[in-house]
Structures are given as C-alpha cells and as structure tokens.
Amino acid sequence: MKLIFAGTPAFALPALRALFASETVAAVLTQPDKPQGRKGVLTPSPVKTEAERLGIPVLQPVKLREDYSALAALGADLMVTCAYGQILTEEILSLFPKGVWNIHASLLPAYRGAAPIARAIIDGAAETGVTIMKTDAGIDTGDMFLSAKTPIAESDTCGTLTERLGELGAELIVKAVKNIAIGSEKLTAQGEGFVCKKVSRTEVDFSKPAKEVCALIRGLSPAPLSFASVGGQTLNFYFAESLETDDISPSGSVLCASPKGGLVVKCGDGAVRITELQPAGGKRMSARDYLNGRKIREGMCFDKPVL
C-alpha cells in the first residue's frame, strides 16, 4: 500500500522511520524551510532532513489547501499525519481511498488542538498518551482507532515526554496501517472534549503552589520556557522540583542561593528548588554552576509577574 507521510517536528521522526521500514512511503509532506537564529538562515524541518536521509521525495507547499496538485498526482492510498501544521480540507481528505490518519499526542477527546503534551504537564495530569484517529474537517475531532497510555512522572519535561510519546505513536501507527490495509479497523466516536491553546514563554508566579510552579516550568521546557527576574537578572527555567517548607517568608523569596544547597524559592504553598536554568543571553546550566559568583543571595525576592 502506497502512503504519504505528513509531519514537521522531531516528534514525528519515530513514526516516519517506522513506516519507512514497514510500508511504501511515496513522499513526505512537511512545512517550508523557515529562517532560524539571529542571521535568519533558512532551515529545513526535522522531518525534511530525515526524509532526505532516507531518500524519500519531499513536498513543501506554503498553503496545501491551494496547492495540492503534486500530492494528488502521487495516487497514494492513505496519508498519515503527525504534527504537520496545516489544516486539511475536504478536497485533500478525499484524495486518499483508505483515508487520512493522524497521530495525536493525547488521549482524545482531551487536549485536542495545539500543545497537548505541554498542557497535560502544566495541568498536572497523571497520565497522557497517543491516539490514532481518522481525520475529518474538524480540529482533532475524527473517530478514534487505537490509543495507548503512559504516566506523567514528576521528572518529565515536555521534552522527555515528547520523546516517549513519539516512540509510542510510531508503534501504534504501524499497527494501525496494517489493520487499515485489510479493512479491519474499528472506529469509536470521540464525544465531548476540549481544545487546548498554544503555549508561549510565561513568567512564573511564585505565589502559586509549588507543584503548580514546577508543572509550569516542566511543561514549558525545553521551549518556549518559563522565566522570572530577581535583582535585575532574568532567568529562564528548565527544571524544578517541589519542596515542603514551614518557612513563612513571602512568596518569591530566595530561601537558599548557594552552590551546595542550590536555588530554592518560596511559593504560595511550599517551595521549589530550581535545578536547571539559563540567564538571559547566556547558556543552559545547572543552578549550582550559575550560583558560583552570581549576585543572588538568600533573602532577595523574585519580581511579581507583570499582568
């Protein structure tokens, strides 16, 4: 069976590799190269880079809904999408006799839309997973075929969970395609759900409970990151862990700032120990390395977020 793979970020790579090993991937559909860095160098998506390594033809229409003639000419039976990044119209969906199937990084119908992995961590969800759904014209509203769960650990960031879900999605889509090829798929309607919004760089509010602060930091790591300022220094955060404390200092107060004890900040309930950070204009490092010679002292207080 001939199929098209549509995807853009690194999350889609395990699925592309798995399908390439088990099926005939006629072409890869991905977003156009985008300028990156201060110099604005045009950079291919991770999926394009991998497709070229595998020797798969690549299509990169700026607006697929207006330019899908090359896709139609391939005469593929089925298309698999995985974080492709463009909406598919009914005209595009109708090109594939065996349908268009999406690898979505949540347990649908929860967390439809953008940033399902980050939002699940930020919300403090105990588990998440991957759902294989048959794409329709809605936003992740199609009937579900297969799903698999994974717990969300307190050590997970959006980065680590994305990697795990990418591998889980690869396993599921290979199984799904084999069943679809012989017409043995059994679909289930989603029912009521909700759409989550994109995430953006967010200032930390230390007046919130420590577990909420940690969840925000982990959910936005490694990008777009959370941040806060203290003593005129802006710090981006990569990882933090929650602590219990009887300290009655105001929220945002620095309870510890030493290479030995790390960077501990009072929250509305409990405290957090920041373990990885990045000073503005600097590189990612451990909090203990940053505190060597830096002017953060116990008793200082992080700025309140700007509303």
Image: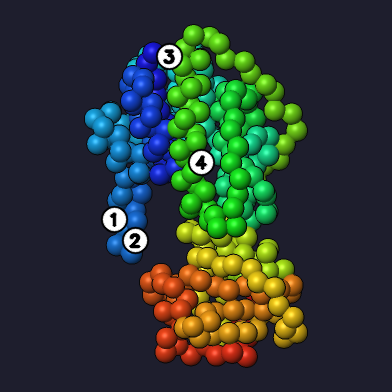
Residue displayed at 45% across by 32% down: 170
Classify residue 283 by image quadrant.
bottom left
Q: Which dot, 2 or 3, sits closer to the camera?
A: 3
| Mark 2 vs 1: CB contact within 8 A | yes
Question: In the rendered structure, are the residues bearing label 3 and label 4 in contact, judged by CB atoms less than 8 Å apart?
Answer: no
Residue 165 tag number: 4
Q: Sequence-wise, which precedes: disc 3 or disc 4? A: 3
Q: CA distance from mark 1 to mark 3?
A: 36 Å
Q: Amino acid at mark 4?
A: Leu
Q: Quadrant of the C terminus?
A: bottom right
**Residue 64 placed where, x, y %?**
44, 31
Give the SS element for disc 4.
Answer: helix
Q: Nearer the viewer, residue 96 or 236?
A: 236
Task: State how far apart marks 2 and 3 are (Cα).
Answer: 39 Å
The dot on residue 41 is 1
The residue at 68%/39% (across/down) is 110
The answer to whether residue 37 is above or below residue 166 is below
Q: Position of residue 176 (x, y in %)?
A: 51, 21
Residue for badge 3: 77
First-in-chain label (4 vs 2) = 2
Of the numbered discs 1 and 3, the one sitting upstream in the chain is: 1
Q: Earlier in the sequence, mark 4 or mark 1?
A: 1
Q: Secondary structure at mark 3?
A: loop
Q: Amino acid at mark 2?
A: Gly
Q: Is residue 122 left or right of residue 75?
A: right
State yes or no: discs 2 and 3 in contact (Cβ < 8 Å): no
- Amino acid type, callout 1: Val
